Amino acid sequence: MTSGDASESGSIVTAPRRVEQKGRNGTWRVLAKLSVSSEPGNERLAMERVAAVVKGLGLSEQRLERLKTAVAEATMNAMEHGNQYRSEVPVVIEVLSSGADLSVRINDQGGIRDPAPDKEVPNLKTKLEGLQTPRGWVHHTVGLVMHL
């Protein structure tokens, strides 16, 4: 596959690009842009495709497994909480590298919603202390950064 081509594998579309984006931390190169339909199980497709994209970056097996877990979890949350498992609404994943850092951005299409008046507003500290359920986050983009 050449740069800029898109190929389809199951429910995942890959469009690798060599685009540079200037940011606060230097120049980021887009390694791939992936799209998965919001169906249970597609988090595994996203996880494996991201792993294939970053294969040449020299991550240890342990760090690669941690990245795969984080990508799968964030993708599953985007499908469930952001897109409500509507298969026609994709989760878009961008993989970028600055040379010193790796960034994976997971984007849902959830839209802005006000919490129901009887719902408890999510609080990260409370969730980490186990005083609030870990479920129920509404988000648009989750960014994972790994220092290379």
Image (tube, rainbow, N blue to C red):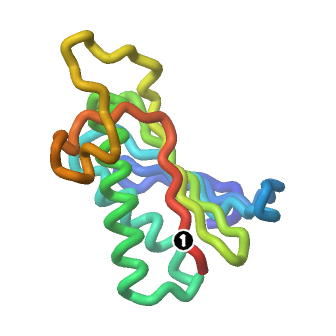
Residue 73 spot, x, y in % from top left = 31, 55
Q: Amino acid at mark 1?
A: Met
Quadrant of the rendering where the C terminus is positioned:
bottom right
Residue located 29% across and 59% down the image: 44
Nearer-the-camera pick, 49 or 80: 80
Q: Is residue 96 left or right of residue 25?
A: left
Q: Secondary structure at mark 1?
A: strand
Residue located 44% across and 72% down the image: 51
**Dot 1: few (<14), some (14–19), or many (≥20) neighbours within 10 Å?**
few
Can the viewer see residue 86 in this picture?
Answer: no
Can the viewer see residue 121 in this picture?
Answer: yes
Q: Is residue 30 left or right of residue 123?
A: right
Q: In the rendered image, which residue does mark 1 sit on?
A: 146
In the image, farthest residue toward the top: 117
Nearer-the-camera pick, 110 or 55: 110
Residue located 59% across and 75% down the image: 147
Q: Is residue 57 left or right of residue 125?
A: right
Residue 112 spot, x, y in % from top left = 46, 19
